Image: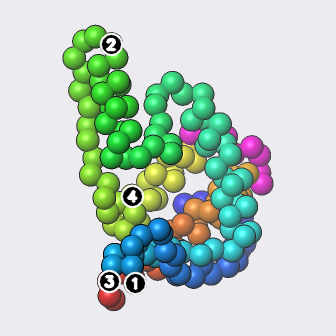
Amino acid sequence: MSSVAPGRHYSTTISIPTRYSLVGSFESPKIRHVWGTAFENILLEGITAAPLISRYAELSEPMVIGVNMCKGLPNIIHKVLDGTGSPQYGVGLDIKSFDSSLQPWLMNAALDILEDNIDFTGYYGWLSFQFSQKFFLRLLASTVAHECRV
């Protein structure tokens, strides 16, 4: 992980754990635990995400966005694997606990790959990426530490 310049440090606003309720019955309410974060962090993440979204838009591979994973995703997989008329192979991943089990080394590897392959629109775009990277890793570390205590 590279730094901005020798001796420079980032200041981050703390995220707080919170929860929200989804529509459900009184007998079986749906409650999700989420992280509430400061608005400036959301803006910096948006600056970081813009070049990533632009890069994905240039690719011809399918990307699942806004699809019900149980209903729409099997159709997408079927179309991708059967689209050429010849047999193809696919890999299935079980992501049911991905968001709660991500390891810091894997997050570092993913962020390093992004940094190497995306033009972050100049120095400030790159700085926002660096900030977001440190913020994500800090948030991940605090989440993992919390899960170990529970």
The residue drawn where x is 44% and y is 53% is 109
Q: CA distance from mark 2 to mark 4?
A: 33 Å
Residues at circles 1 and 3 in contact by the CB criterion of under 8 Å: yes
Tell me the mark number nearer the camera, choosing from 4 and 1.
Answer: 1
Whichever of labels 2 and 4 marks the residue nearer the N terminus, that label is 2
In the rendered structure, which disc, 3 or 4, sits on the residue that comes first in sequence?
Answer: 4
Q: Nearer the viewer, mark 2 or mark 3?
A: 2
Per the image, the residue denoted by label 2 is 84
Work out whether mark 1 precedes mark 2 in sequence or the reverse, and give the earlier one.
Answer: 2
Q: Amino acid at mark 4?
A: Leu
Examine the rendered structure and indicate whether residue 148 appears above or below residue 93.
below
The span shown in magenta is 117-124
In whole angstroms, how far apart are the C-alphas of marks 1 and 3?
5 Å
The amino acid on which the numbered mark 3 sits, given as a three-letter code, is: Cys
Viewer-nearest of labels 3 and 4? Answer: 3
Which residue is painted at 56% across and 39% down in the image?
117
User: What quarter of the picture does the N terminus occupy?
Assistant: bottom right
Instruction: Answer with mark 2 or mark 3, whichever residue precedes in sequence.
Output: 2
Name the residue tied to disc 4: 106
Badge 3: residue crowd in 10 Å (few <14, some 14–19, many ≥20): few
**Label 3 belongs to which residue?**
148
**Contact? badges 3 and 4 (CB < 8 Å):** no
Q: Is residue 119 magenta?
A: yes
- SS for tag 1? helix
Q: Is residue 6 visible?
A: no
| Comparing labels 1 and 2, the label whose residue is closer to the camera | 2
Question: Disc number at residue 146?
Answer: 1
